[in-house]
Image (cartoon, rainbow, N blue to C red):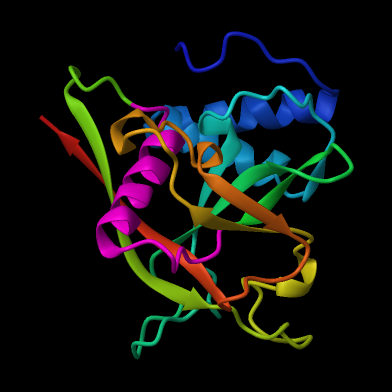
Amino acid sequence: MALMKSCRGSSSEVGYVRFAMLACLMLTCNGASLRVLMRSKFNKGRHIDIPADLPVGSQAINIHYAEGNLCTKRRNTCGTGSRVEVLVNTEDDHQVWAPLCAANKLNDTLQDTLAHIVCNQYQGWPDTDASESVTGVAELPYIIPEAPEEGDLLWVFNPSNITHWATITGWSKKPPRRIRAVQELALKVSTKPCKSSLLFSVKCYEQHI
């Protein structure tokens, strides 16, 4: 099982790693599923002290199932689909997880290109010659809700817990096929919520040839 070559950390962290790997063995999940389990444990904190030269690979992006209070303009869409968070630098030279705002300045084609980049970055850009391919489609954006009141649904998106937000302000000069990470695009990081009041929504598809 070549999912993890080494693991260093506290006894509690190592214990969780063992639990996650055991759960994957019992459920016959793959490396991506294990990564989701690990992220649910270690990415709860928004503020992370990590080296500034962190590679902008699969460890620098998260795709979350939409919380129950995230809705689009359509009816009966609350809690469906997925939203995106990216690891970004702050002004005080730290790195934090920031929800990705809707990319309103991009046309429909570039929206789907962005979705393709998001999904492939998350999956570590599978080899195109392999039997697996990943693509992404941009969905209707989510409306950022008000902070939930105490006693609301347990699994909700609470904007008051977010310290930073990320917005794509323009496309890269590179051809789309050469962009390997959202962080390579013109990205504005702000402590204020998305100006559009919308979150980017994506749907990823895996195809096994």
Name the one closer to the observer, 91 or 121.
Answer: 91
Q: Is residue 170 above or below residue 173?
A: below
Q: Is residue 102 magenta?
A: yes
Name the one closer to the observer, 85 or 90.
Answer: 90
Q: Is residue 124 above or below residue 129?
A: below
Which quadrant, please, contains the C terminus?
top left
In this picture, which residue range is highlighted in magenta?
Answer: 100-125
Furthest-right residue in view?
Answer: 92
Which quadrant, please, contains the N terminus?
top left
Picture residue at 52% right of the left edge, 28% below the top: 57
Q: Is residue 200 magenta?
A: no
Picture residue at 73% right of the left edge, 49% below the top: 44
Residue 193 on image: x %, y %: 69, 71
Picture residue at 55% right of the left edge, 80% below the top: 69
Picture residue at 48% right of the left edge, 66% below the top: 102
Residue 197 on image: x %, y %: 58, 78
Q: Is residue 79 visible?
A: no
Residue 85 on image: x %, y %: 58, 52
Q: Quadrant of residue 156?
A: bottom right
Q: Quadrant of residue 148?
A: bottom right
In the displayed structure, does residue 180 sit left or right of residue 149?
left
In the displayed structure, does residue 146 sit left or right of residue 108?
right
